[in-house]
């Protein structure tokens, strides 16, 4: 009965954690550039039943001791592009993140291309964090001449003004692995540790578009129903074990 209780307990904990991940995905379904989280599970230690004192007719019989959630990994698949017609909206079609630097010099990365041009002509996100741009020689980063109305970004990320003045190029960064970046909130990410290497990549830009989240509502609803059913089944194991203990305690 101990194994029934333990297996049921670990199952309930794992499914609750999966439901938390699904809820987070559902909340961010309309967040621009959001990348969904996927839950994964693994079995805990197996116990070999083919041993002394445990009768079995099977040569390879095992009893699991539970399950655990191994964590949530970031799904970096492409989200759909939505046309907005706003010149400062930039969608990335392919790999890569915008590199942001805040007023304290802290770096983060995002796929949210809802940008802005500040009073100095620098590209920023809606929170004022500066988007990394490699400026052309002779361009003063403190006075680029860019505005929200004259910004032009081509497919390769090169920036210019509407009258043809070339400014520079937007840099994109990516990293290997689906768990190398962790969320710091507000759809921004930072490297999981100091060993994570960020490298520049090239992808297509679409001005006047925004990348939507890659959350599939139908799939999330299906996963939620399955997780709820699995949670209910695990809870029945606890109820069954409790009833069996009660029967044993009533034996005189």
Image (cartoon, helix red, strand yellow):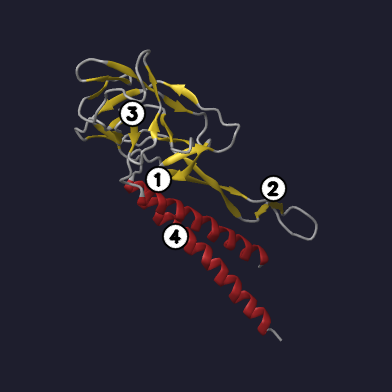
Q: Are marks 3 and 2 in contact (CB under 8 Å)?
A: no
Q: CA distance from mark 2 to mark 1?
A: 50 Å
| CB-based contact (under 8 Å), mark 3 and mark 1 | no
Image quarter of the N terminus: bottom right
Q: Earlier in the sequence, mark 4 or mark 2?
A: 2
Q: Is residue 171 above or below residue 227?
A: above
**Residue 129 spot, x, y in % from top left:** 39, 36
Foreground mark, 1 or 4, reads: 1
User: Which mark is on residue 60?
Assistant: 2
> Gap in Å between the C-alphas at discs 3 and 2?
66 Å
Count of numbered circles on the image: 4
Quarter of the picture holding the C terminus: bottom right
- List the residue tagged with mark 1: 186
Q: Residue furthest top?
A: 137
- The 10 Å Cα crowd at callout 1, few under 14, some 14 to 19, many 20 or more, is few
Q: Earlier in the sequence, mark 3 or mark 1?
A: 3
Query: Does residue 6 lie above or below 76 as drawn?
Result: below
| Residue wearing tag 4 | 229
Q: Which of marks 2 and 3 precedes in the sequence?
A: 2
Task: Specify the farthest residue to the bottom.
Answer: 252
Which badge, 4 or 3, is on the more N-terminal residue? 3
SS for dot 2: loop
Label 1, label 4: how far apart the Cα atoms are: 32 Å
Whether 25 is drawn above or below 55: the answer is above
Which residue corresponds to the image point at 45% horizontal and 55% vertical from the top-left?
A: 20
The first of marks 1 and 4 along the sequence is 1
The residue that mark 3 highlights is: 122
């Amino acid at each position: 009965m101990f194994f029934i209780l333990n297996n049921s307990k670990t199952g309930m904990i794992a499914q609750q954690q999966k439901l938390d991940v699904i809820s987070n995905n559902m909340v961010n379904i309309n967040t621009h550039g959001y990348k969904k989280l996927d839950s994964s599970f693994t079995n805990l230690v197996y116990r070999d039943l083919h041993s002394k004192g445990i009768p079995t007719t099977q040569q390879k019989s095992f009893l699991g001791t539970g399950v655990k959630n191994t964590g949530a990994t970031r799904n970096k698949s492409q989200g759909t592009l939505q046309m907005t017609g706003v010149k400062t909206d930039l969608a990335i079609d392919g790999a890569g993140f915008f590199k942001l630097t805040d007023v304290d010099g802290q770096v983060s990365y995002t796929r949210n291309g809802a940008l802005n041009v500040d009073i100095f002509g620098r590209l920023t996100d809606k929170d004022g964090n500066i988007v990394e741009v490699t400026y052309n020689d002779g361009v003063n980063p403190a006075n680029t001449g860019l505005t929200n109305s004259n910004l032009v970004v081509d497919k390769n990320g090169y920036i210019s003004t509407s009258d043809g003045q070339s400014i520079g190029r937007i840099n994109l960064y990516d990293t290997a692995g689906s768990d190398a970046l962790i969320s710091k909130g507000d759809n921004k990410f930072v490297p999981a540790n100091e060993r994570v290497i960020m490298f520049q990549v090239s992808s297509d830009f679409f001005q006047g578009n925004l990348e939507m989240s890659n959350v599939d509502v139908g799939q999330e609803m299906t996963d939620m129903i399955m997780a709820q059913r699995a949670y209910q089944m695990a809870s029945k194991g606890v109820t069954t074990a409790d009833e069996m203990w009660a029967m044993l305690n009533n034996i005189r």
